[in-house]
Image (cartoon, rainbow, N blue to C red):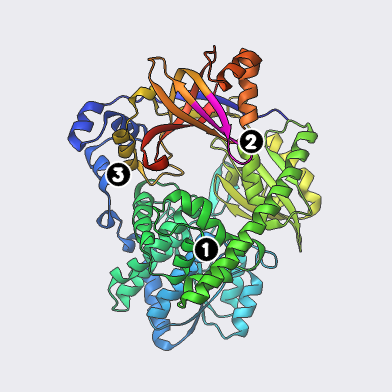
């Protein structure tokens, strides 16, 4: 199959960058980046640069939060048995932890159940309700799930239970002609900012953030200072990054506060996880949550049981916490090995399929179902197409999807909802289950309905500023930290320069997978550069464009004819105690 196509586009939004820079004491380039993020008004700039705890929205604005707090307060007073039903990913585990600790603080008779990925699948279901009934549970409260569990909640209500839903996923609907008819359950209270009649002003909270907001209202109802719930800010920030939520508005503030708290966490389990990943004493960023710490929390829900991660967060003994953290790291290492093997098989299927589908559906019946989402994401990165990876579960086919900006996965799945036994998700990601005989009709129907054009399937790389390397200084790079935390919805700034010459290139690293470069800009200024990854592919590109002799000249430090454009990330290299400007080459042409 044809590899991904790219189109580089410089963002050109106007503004008084010099005026903004002077007003807020920032570099004009930083001011331009803020404008590119649609941060325009002075109060928006102020909140973006300096937003803190006081800029968060009032949790009482969440529809049903006050009513649910009243219900739970009465249940706690009566001594009723309460069960939290969460989910097995970072967000679900964090939300479960927040509610379990919070309700315990309120004096509730409470426990928690997290679905088994293999046996139960996602969210509340009839099996978990039956187990709750056997245990004499009076009240169920969901977190990071429940909004689409209409049938399961009906069963719980038939059994006489009280049900409170806290969730953040899209509201399910069915199409009636050209109109959407949104579906609702019989839950006694539903707390989800995405409800059409919910007045909460920010709609993109993760499940843990919704649980935390609700807990503040409950604390107030129980006569506990609401600020006591701030101890869970590190978990909210962790979950927001781990669930790949947009780092805009309130989410960005929550992550800033969460990272600051995580830096000095008093939670023995979190401290152990940080220490065993060699991050103790280092500046922890959103990157570390997304790619180092978070995958360890996720690994238990993927390959074993998410109760291990919940146990780590609840552990008070540092020795036991260290042992639990070590187990999660081992599980994550196993997950990495399994992912590598299955990804190779998946890519081979895509390459040999020769179908040219706009929406890729890859069926890997032997693959561990917990790896489907990771593999789908990796395939999407390589081909820039919506991707579903399907596996065979205990009760039929299960799968996960990862999408591109031009394709709302949840909406497109709703068009073929009759093929699923269960489905749900977001525009960019989704999960599903279906009978095996529906796999091929699913692939065919999605592609028949897909309105994706060739233009849609060329990834747009949006460049913030075409910035010559000579502009880079340690002071400017330091100012770029004002833009953190970066992630989805608030990506790292993207810079580009053209007419770059390579005056020297040499391979380093144990596997010769690091290419160090000395770059000369069009203005003659020299800057260190580095390229990680497929170094042979990098060099082959220039061999094909300029010839073998020119590449050899660059590798030998001789003058050569190579000239290229690059998208780069500026950094500071502090090798041997010397701070020098260095650029990481991300893309080239």
Which residue is identified by label 2?
Answer: 382
Which residue is identified by label 1?
Answer: 92
Q: Is residue 245 visible?
A: no
Q: Residues within 10 Å of mark 1 (few under 14, many from 20)?
A: many
Q: Residue at x 61, y 36 (%)?
A: 513
Q: Is residue 490 above or below residue 500?
A: below
The label on residue 48 is 3
The residue sitting at the left extreme is 23
Q: Which sits in the foreground, 46 or 272? A: 272
**Mark closer to the chain start, 3 or 2:** 3
Q: In the rendered view of the protein, which quadrant contains the C terminus?
A: top right
**Mark closer to the chain start, 1 or 2:** 1
Q: In the rendered view of the protein, which quadrant contains the N terminus?
A: top right
Q: Residue at x 27, y 50 (%)?
A: 51
Q: CA distance from mark 3 to mark 1?
A: 28 Å
Q: Which sits in the foreground, 144 or 335? A: 335
Q: Is residue 123 above or below residue 544?
A: below
Question: Which range of residues does the magenta coloring cover?
Answer: 505-517
Q: Main secondary structure of the magenta part?
A: strand
Where in the figure is residue 166, as x and y percent of width and height?
Answer: 47, 65
**Mark closer to the chain start, 3 or 1:** 3
């Amino acid at each position: 199959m044809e590899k991904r196509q790219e189109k580089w586009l410089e963002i050109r939004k106007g503004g008084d960058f010099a005026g903004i820079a002077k007003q807020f004491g920032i570099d004009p380039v930083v001011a331009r980046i803020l404008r590119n993020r649609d941060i325009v008004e002075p109060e928006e700039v102020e909140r973006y640069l300096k937003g803190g705890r006081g800029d968060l929205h009032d949790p009482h604005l969440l529809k049903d939060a006050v009513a649910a707090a009243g219900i739970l307060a009465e249940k706690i007073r009566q001594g009723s048995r309460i069960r939290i039903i969460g989910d097995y990913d970072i967000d679900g585990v964090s939300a479960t932890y927040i509610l379990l600790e919070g309700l315990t603080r309120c004096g509730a008779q409470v426990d928690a159940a997290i679905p088994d990925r293999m046996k139960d699948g996602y969210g509340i279901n009839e099996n978990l309700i039956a187990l709750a009934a056997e245990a004499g549970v009076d009240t169920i409260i969901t977190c990071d799930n429940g909004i689409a569990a209409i049938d399961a909640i009906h069963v719980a209500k038939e059994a006489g239970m009280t049900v409170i839903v806290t969730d953040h996923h899209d509201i399910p609907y069915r199409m009636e002609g050209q109109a959407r008819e949104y579906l609702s359950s019989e839950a006694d209270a539903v707390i989800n900012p995405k409800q059409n009649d919910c007045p909460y002003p920010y709609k993109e909270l993760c499940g843990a953030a919704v649980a935390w907001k609700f807990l503040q209202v409950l604390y107030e109802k129980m006569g506990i200072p609401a600020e006591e719930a701030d101890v869970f800010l590190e978990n909210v920030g962790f979950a927001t990054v781990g669930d790949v939520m947009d780092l805009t508005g309130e989410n960005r503030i929550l992550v800033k506060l969460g990272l600051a708290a995580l830096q000095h966490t008093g939670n023995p389990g979190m401290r152990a996880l940080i220490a065993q990943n060699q991050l103790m004493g280092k500046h922890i960023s959103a990157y570390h949550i997304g790619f180092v710490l978070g995958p360890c929390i996720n690994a238990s829900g993927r390959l074993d049981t998410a109760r291990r991660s919940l146990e780590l967060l609840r552990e008070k003994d540092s020795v036991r916490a260290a042992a639990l953290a070590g187990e999660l790291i081992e599980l994550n290492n196993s997950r990495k090995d399994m992912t590598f093997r299955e990804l190779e098989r998946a890519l081979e299927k895509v390459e040999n399929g020769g179908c040219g589908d706009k929406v890729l559906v890859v069926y890997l019946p032997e693959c561990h179902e917990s790896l489907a989402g990771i593999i789908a994401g990796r395939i999407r990165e390589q081909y820039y197409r919506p991707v579903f990876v399907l596996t065979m579960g205990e009760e039929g086919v299960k799968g996960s999807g990862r999408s591109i900006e031009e394709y709302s996965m949840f909406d497109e799945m709703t068009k073929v909802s009759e093929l699923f036994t269960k489905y749900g998700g977001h525009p960019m990601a989704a999960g599903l289950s279906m009978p095996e005989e529906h796999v091929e009709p699913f692939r065919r129907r999605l592609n028949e309905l897909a309105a994706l054009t060739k233009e849609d399937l060329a990834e747009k790389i949006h460049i913030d500023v075409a910035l010559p390397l000579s502009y880079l200084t340690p002071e400017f790079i330091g100012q770029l930290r004002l833009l953190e935390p970066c992630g989805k919805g608030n990506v790292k700034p993207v810079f580009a320069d053209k007419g770059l010459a390579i005056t020297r290139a040499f391979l380093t690293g144990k596997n010769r997978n690091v290419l160090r470069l000395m770059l000369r800009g069009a203005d003659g200024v020299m800057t260190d550069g580095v390229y990680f990854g497929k170094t042979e592919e990098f060099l082959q590109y220039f061999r094909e464009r300029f010839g073998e002799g020119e590449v050899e000249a660059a590798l030998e430090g001789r003058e050569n004819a190579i000239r290229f454009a690059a998208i780069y990330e500026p950094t500071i290299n502090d090798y041997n105690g010397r701070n020098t400007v260095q650029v990481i080459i991300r893309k080239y042409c």
